[in-house]
Image (cartoon, rainbow, N blue to C red):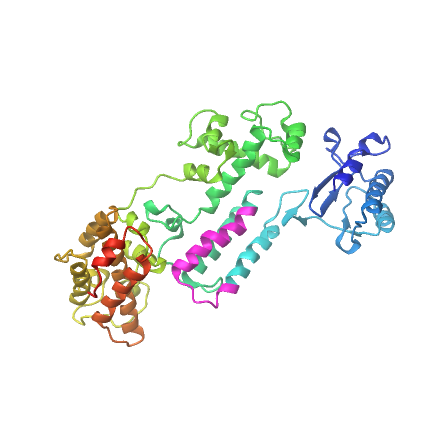
Amino acid sequence: MEYLNRILGQLHRNGDFNFHPKCRKLNCTHVCFADDLLMFCRADTISIQILHQAFLKFSKASGMKANPSKSAIYLAGVKQEFRTEMIGRLGFSEGTLPFRYLGIPLDSKKISIHQFLPLIERITARITCWSAKLLSYAGRCQLKKSVFFGIQSYWSQVFILPKRVQKAIDTICRTFLWTGSASSSRRALVAWDRICTPLNAGGLNIMNLTIWNKAAIAKLLWDLARKKDCLWVRWVHCYYIKRADIETVNAPKQAAWVVRKIIQCRDVIMENQQLIGSLSDRLKTVCCLGKFQIHKLYIAMLPRFDRVIWRNLLLVANVIPRHKFIVWLAAQHRLPTVDRLAKFGIQIPPMCVFCNKQEETFQHLYFDCCITKSLWSRICCWMGSPRQILDWENELKWICSKARSHAWRNAITAAAFIHVIALVWKARNNMRFQNLAYDEDKTAREIALLIHIRGRHSRSWKIGLQQLNSFP
């Protein structure tokens, strides 16, 4: 491809060759990435012929030829007779805007919402592929953080996504989290805005798409500010910014909408209260070794949240993620107990399935019920911390103080608490919906096995596991 670059780079020496509008100053005739090649010139017969002959020269020398079925010519501002003539000469079909290049739609005007459908369809296709699998809430959450984020982040680093597109993506992801599919819907147990907050604020640390999109576009602003040596930066400076200061230049009305959005992103940076100084100073604070860190700016752009006391529970090591998710719901009183289901219009037998003495509420289930209280008391004794079991709020405060410690006994106790909450909820569902009997001995043994199996590779737990060598 170096030979092709050299041939096309010499076209400016030909006095008969006319550049595509706004390409002359940079002698820009082509853009190439791997085998994806864009070549452009003014729509006149001589210029097209010169450009075509240059490519044929390269083809003859290298043996690489254009595939007519995968190639197209794009013409604008010319008559139909000229279009027909050029298509006949070159042997390519006529393409229409927008077209996809490196997975992104290219157009001469602002991208419409319809052009973002491939992004939405790709996310939906992944969900459809996974719907048949038995994924827990925690599993779906992890897929959202990794796979979904990877799909949408590529687009988010190029465009400011329209609000309707952002809302559509959030709706799909929210529906997938709570139902496992992209189509069926039900009432969410926790609001999506809450889910998209950091762990220490009570969320699941899922990226807020709107804020991350702005932080990603700010990276393009940083490239403009430091005049990064790449074609698009040189082009924007050459035709729009010229010698103006990026901190004060107005977004030119005649500039492409993407360029205007990048420059307007400057206002978002300057209005941020977490950053201080000039635009350059603010952007430098989110750089590491001269490299712009989108995540650091994202954190700076997040609103300030109050910390929740149970944040350390979500950081306890050697615990099944599914169980952590149940505790996350429980800490916010969002488990669908009978009293909450009644608010949604769902009527089921109200009595507690463990003791059958009182109506099931969250407070009764954890730990006013004598059966669940007995299980937690039994585990505490096994851990070497016998104590009187109090209500949920007091137990949560007590275990959170343990979760902050790095001592092995406190860490294992916090892990045991998480397993108790999750297995009590599992037993409740089995008894209520599958008519299975509850066995406290079996549940206690399961908790002990989980502690040993999950923690067997932890050096800090080694001494503790040797002491806890019997079933509770």
The verdict on residue 404 being magenta is no
Direction from residue 411 to residue 44 in the image, left or right: right
x 76%, y 51%: residue: 71
Residue 414 can be seen, yes or no: no
Residue 469 can be seen, yes or no: yes
User: Residue 244: image x %, image y %?
Assistant: 60, 23
x 19%, y 50%: residue: 398
Is the stretch drawn in magenta largely helix, strand or loop? helix
The verdict on residue 133 being magenta is yes
Q: Count numbered badges in the picture.
A: 0
User: Residue 19: image x %, image y %?
Assistant: 78, 34
Q: Quadrant of the C terminus?
A: bottom left
Q: To which quarter of the image does residue 125 belong?
A: bottom right
Indicate whether 270 appears above or below 173.
above
Direction from residue 459 to residue 263 in the image, left or right: right
User: Residue 161: image x %, image y %?
Assistant: 54, 45
Indicate whether 41 appears above or below 124.
above
x 84%, y 49%: residue: 90
Q: Quadrant of the N terminus?
A: top right
Q: Which residues are magenta?
A: 129-154
| Most foreground residue, 101 or 415 | 415
User: Residue 459: image x %, image y %?
Assistant: 30, 51
